[in-house]
Image (spheres, rainbow, N blue to C red):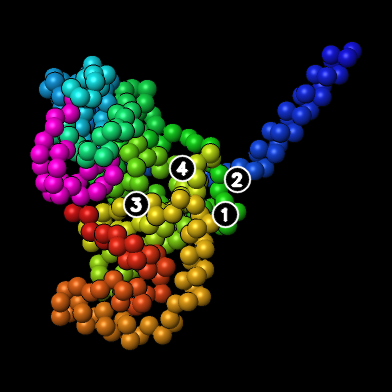
Amino acid sequence: MFFFNNYIVILIIYIFKKLILISYIKIMKKYIFPNSSKLTLSKFKDYICDHCENIVTLDFYHGKSNVDLCLDCFNKPIDELFKEHEKSHHTCDICEQHIKTGKIRNICYFDVCSKCWTTLELKNCFLRINKDTCEDLILTDREEIFSIQSLELDVPDEFQKEVNDEGLREEYINMVDSIVRPPFPNWNPQGWALIASFEEVLSFDALCSFVIRCQHGKPHQICSVVEDDHGRVAMNIIYQDHLEFLKDFKEWEENRDNDIDSYIEKVKKSFKEYYECDNEIIMKATDSFAVYTRFKRNLSCYYG
């Protein structure tokens, strides 16, 4: 009887802990992407491994800059896979930093700077593609492949309304189809949500917004999102925590100049005469925190 009673107590404690966990995790619905987005193996018929140049079977790895590796090559030491070059004016596909001078390592168009090379792990840059994994993969209009595996989600209280807004959810699904720069390799769209509609940049053909990470066990990072004049979308992580974002938003709201008309005229005049304008003036000429932040961080609005 003693052991039976102990078992009951342990069971009650376990159920109580589960209930606390469920109440803590604020679940948002799984995004449902159109069937036309589903990846099919037929796309990869007669594809070539970018290292050994043999035809890959329909079980291989697809990575950054559309590099494909057969199973044998993927398991080789990375020193054998990547060639070392002295090249200038390249962009690292891991950190996205411009490489002006110095050594880079690459496979085809997948470039890695010397700083990122020391911590490079192929598993973080490639997706396994076969008949089993295709069910959870989508192919976007921009030829990007993303995993849409279900994740345990956690939505901050401050963003419950935005994350579960049907209009923003639909806008986010459409946005994913145009992403050319996700926040990191092997990014999963299921773990993120749009928290504001896109807003125009004055006299500049671009739109800006924000996306929040809602994956349980991960920080609630915030991305600045931009759509350029060709419909390409880029995401840049700018906050490691949503509370930092809210703090800056509050400060901006309290201190910004509401009389922006004179700055708007300066922006228009500058673009008309010089086809460009100082970031400081654009920041003062907008009533959008998304636009203000993009220019304050000196992030690109063009991804051609």
Instruction: Answer with mark 4 or mark 3, whichever residue precedes in sequence.
Output: 4
Q: Quote the CA–CA distance across marks 2 and 1.
A: 8 Å
Q: Is residue 9 above or below residue 37?
A: above
Q: Which mark is residue 256?
A: none
Do residues under tags 2 and 1 come within 8 Å of each other at their CB atoms?
yes
Instruction: Answer with mark 2 or mark 3, whichever residue precedes in sequence.
Output: 2
Q: Amino acid at mark 4?
A: Gly
Q: Which mark is residue 26?
A: 2
Q: Is residue 22 left or right of residue 237?
A: right
Q: Name the quadrant of the C terminus.
A: bottom left
Q: Quote the CA–CA distance across marks 4 and 1.
A: 14 Å
Q: Which mark is residue 191?
A: 4
Q: Amino acid at mark 1?
A: Gln
Q: Residue at x 35, y 73 (%)?
A: 283
Q: Is residue 93 above or below residue 239?
A: above
Q: Quote the CA–CA distance across marks 2 and 4.
A: 13 Å
User: Magenta segment range?
Assistant: 81-104
Instruction: Answer with mark 2 or mark 4, whichever residue precedes in sequence.
Output: 2
Q: Quote the CA–CA distance across marks 4 and 3.
A: 14 Å
Q: Residue at x 14, y 42 (%)?
A: 102
Count of marks overlaid on the render:
4
Question: Where does residue 138 sit, x and y in percent of width and height?
Answer: 34, 37
Q: Nearer the viewer, residue 21 or 177?
A: 21
Query: On the image, numbered disc 3 is attached to which residue?
Result: 235
Q: Residue at x 26, y 54 (%)?
A: 232
Secondary structure at numbered mark 3: strand
Membership of 98 in magenta stretch: yes
Q: Name the quadrant of the N terminus.
A: top right
Instruction: Answer with mark 4 or mark 1, whichever residue precedes in sequence.
Output: 1
Query: On the image, numbered disc 1 is attached to which residue?
Result: 160
Please say whether residue 45 is visible from this viewpoint: no
Question: Where does residue 8 sit, x and y in percent of width and height?
Answer: 82, 22
